[in-house]
Image (spheres, rainbow, N blue to C red):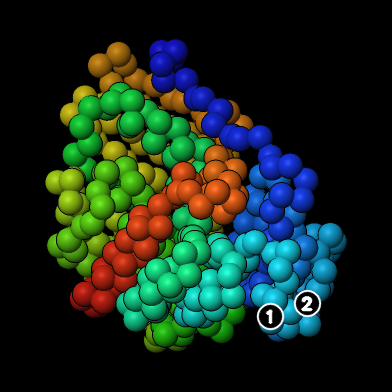
Amino acid sequence: MHPDHAPQRLTLPPLAAGELAFAAVHLDHPHIYDQCRGLIGAGAELIWVYDPEPARVAAFLKAFPQAKAARSLDEVLHDPALTLVTAAGVPNERGPLGCRVLRAGKDYLTDKPPFTTLDQLAEARRAVKETGRTFMVFYGDRLGVECAVHASHLISQGVIGRVLQVVGLGPHRIKLPTRPSWFFERARYGGILCDLGSHQCEKFLHFSGSTDAEVLSSAVANFAHPQFPELEDYGEATLLGSSGVTGHHRVDWFTPAGQSSWGDGRTFVLGTRGTIELRSFCDVTQSPQGELLILVDDQGEHRIPCAGKVGLPFYGQFVRDCLHRTETALSQAHAFKAAELCLRTQASARRLS
């Protein structure tokens, strides 16, 4: 491996004790656990938890006993010591909840997708403008993956030249018996391109250097689950970014039972002087770990393991952004544009049979 290609650790030191306090609310999706671990690892202090389902609160407190269970969301929002609220609610409830948090004077971090309609996005943009608070989205397929963090560094350094195309593949294992009722209700989960496709839209904007994109085509289908008529198990979209870069992504619920991970997520970035492939969650037939970056450039072919070598700077940057009113982790415009783009791909999608 050329020394210039080696992973570089990008994590930040944690905050000082007591510098930022946060709450976890609406625990519908287990991603809330990763969000809390990330914030705690960055030095933030978890002081409250709230969910209308006592069983979810009890399970959460086993993992995070330092939190205090609130009797209501209002009890959380009225605490003047609180800076930030993080949530992973039902997708169609995430946007309205965020607006309520912002208008209570707190910053907000939510799981993706943050919205299921363009009206919700418009209201969130108004809330940000009115309050000056941050409505942030954790797009985990990039911000929570070390090989994707390293790819950003290599691309910014010009290692593969000018980016020409980004292709993203996002298969998932469906695990039907474990899914809540809202998983099968399109109005609540937003559709597959809104949900799983949100990761792909964010990665496309970031790796292509685009601030906007045109949806050239998109499609959805329910190929194999007729017993759930509102479920979409397949989606695809083709985009043209404002930077002139093209993109294509496919998302689905067809990860085979024999695969070692829940999904063989991959990203391919084509440049004028090289290519990058990310095997984020597994390296099929080789390792269930994933976190592998494959670079091909003028100097050769490079397999670059990234697990434990790069770090995940998002949370360290984000907690400082909350304190200093900066945008080093992810800009508000970018977070909302990725959400807008996945909603537009969903809205314009033709249905395949």
Q: Residue at x 49, y 61 (%)?
A: 134
Left or right: 296 with respect to 96?
left
Rendering quarter of residue 262 = bottom right
Q: Residue at x 26, y 76 (%)?
A: 347
Q: Residue at x 62, y 57 (%)?
A: 35
Q: Which mark is residue 241?
A: none
Amino acid type at mark 1: Leu
Binning the other alpha carbons within 10 Å of mark 2 as few (below 14), some (14 to 19) or many (20 upward) gives some
Rendering quarter of residue 352 = bottom left
Nearest the camera: 15 or 294? 15
In the picture of the structure, the residue carrying the numbered disc 2 is 70
Residue 255 visible in the picture: no
Residue 70 at x, y = what percent?
78, 77
In the picture of the structure, the residue carrying the numbered disc 1 is 73
Q: Are marks 2 and 1 in contact (CB under 8 Å)?
A: yes
Residue 166 at x, y = what percent?
27, 45
Q: Residue at x 71, y 68 (%)?
A: 80
**Compared to 6, does 244 lie above or below?**
below
Position of the C terminus, as image quadrant, is bottom left
